[in-house]
Amino acid sequence: MEITINKTNLSVIQGDITNQTTEAIVNAANPGLMGGGGVDGAIHRTGGPAILEECKEIIARQGRLPTGKAVITGGGNLRASYVIHTVGPVWHGGGRDEAELLRSAYRESLRLASEKRLTGISFPSISTGAYGYPLDEAAQIAVGTVVAFLKEQETSLTDVVFVLFDARAYDSYRSALEEIADGSHAA
Ligand code: ADP
């Protein structure tokens, strides 16, 4: 499933984000930037120790990364040249600003990519694993935020890809994109 917004192709695929060839991939990190499980663990395993070294330097310089913010490192051994590390919200039931913090994680990642004049960025499903955000709600926020950003700004991005690890997440993101495409005739 793919639509075009301004000059950017926005697509939803099922796959492993560590194999993506976009110039940047996004990591669903935690505030300590020390690696962990899920997609974070996979990115550090495949990318090698150089990414963690850069993360440690960032933490030493600026402290822990607040929820909703993003930072960028090199991609180490990944096919992507850069990793954008962002922290999504932990789901507490919806009353702790989770939706706005999730929007912010996507927006800040896109803003960094755009500032660096990157050509492509791949996103995982931020917050829907260990952080427990309900999948369908997260998918609508993720797709809605990216579409709004691309409509509002001229960017360097030719490709934005949502890379979903399993079929259930893929279906959820594809439905969210279809809904938006139908609503705005963006396809
Ligand atoms: P969070 O802590 O933000 O919830 P997780 O890594 O636990 O992050 O999960 C986020 C999503 O990433 C989940 O949907 C999970 O299935 C998915 N995921 C795990 N490994 C990969 C991978 N290699 N590529 C893409 N997505 C992945």
Image: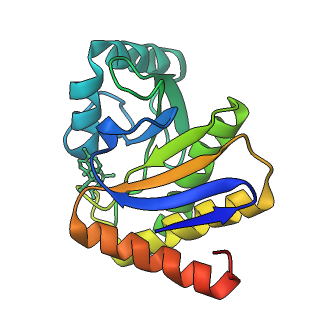
Residue in view at x 38 percent, y 51 percent: 124
Say left or right for 36 vs 63: left
- Measuring from the top left, give residue 122's x and y in whole percent: 46, 46
159 to 34, vertically: above or below: below
Evaluate whether residue 49 shows in this view: yes
Residue at point 58% right, 79% down? 180
- Quarter of the image for residue 112 reads top right
Q: Is residue 63 above or below residue 103?
A: above
Position of residue 101 measured from the top left corner of the image (x, y, whole percent): 52, 58
Q: Residue at x 80, y 49 (%)?
A: 154
For the view shown, which residue lies furthest in the bottom direction? 183
Pick the front one: 49 or 98: 49
The figure's colour scheme reads rainbow
Residue at image coords 38%, 39%: 20
Camera sees residue 94: no
Left or right side of 48 for 103 = right
Please identify the quadrant where the C terminus is shown: bottom right
Please say if 175 is above or below 83.
below
Q: How many marks?
A: 0
Q: Nearer the viewer, residue 120 or 73?
A: 120
**How far from the left and from the top, in percent, is residue 149?**
69, 58
Residue 161's place in the image compared with 21, above or below, is below
